[in-house]
Image: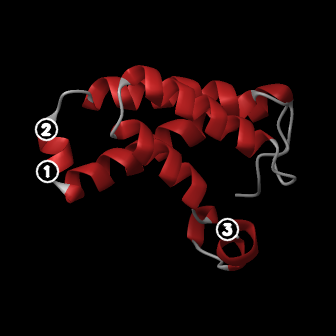
Amino acid sequence: MEFLIVDQVHLPFGGFSLFLIFVLSWSALSSPEIGAIGGFFGGFLLDLDPSSNGPMGQWALILSAVGFGIAFLSYGDASLRGSPLRLIVFVAGAVVVSICPYLRLNSLFGLEVGTI
């Protein structure tokens, strides 16, 4: 559904991914092991997306690492669960952190990374 509806909305700097936000939010509220496993399966599903132009496993690798990292940083932090604004800022930062290695790896592989 996201690819049918959200991709039709044109925003500056490319837009957003509801699935990426969901996976990283789930990881932020989980233990580090669950964050890495959730990141891997979420990345695997993003790798299966027809519009993904990177090699198979690229998103799985990136989201496994970022999912573990965000879960590790937020594990045991009760103030994160008590403050929705802090969770939003934390997940927004994790989205940026996950997109940067994706763009970097695509440029290293010589793939198109979009027009700027």
Residue 104 in sight:
no
The label shown at residue 21 is none
Determine which residue is flagged by label 2: 78
Name the residue rendered at 35%, 26% in the picture: 31
Q: Kindly check if marks 2 and 1 are in contact, taking CB atoms under 8 A apart as contact.
A: yes
Instruction: Point out residue 98 in the picture as x, y percentages from the top left corner.
Output: 54, 37
As helix, strand or loop, the secondary structure at mark 3 comes to helix
Instruction: Reply above or below: 3 against 94.
Output: below
Name the residue rendered at 59%, 55% in the picture: 19
Instruction: Point out residue 27 in the picture as x, y percentages from the top left corner.
Output: 42, 37
Q: Quadrant of residue 60?
A: top right
Report the quarter where the C terminus lies: bottom right
* Closer to the camera in the image, 33 or 56: 33
Report the quarter where the N terminus lies: bottom right
The number of numbered discs placed on residues in the rendered structure image is 3
Instruction: Point out residue 24 in the picture as x, y percentages from the top left corner.
Output: 46, 43
Determine which residue is flagged by label 3: 2
Q: Which mark is first along the chain, 3 or 2?
A: 3
Q: Is residue 90 left or right of residue 53?
A: left
As helix, strand or loop, the secondary structure at mark 2 comes to helix
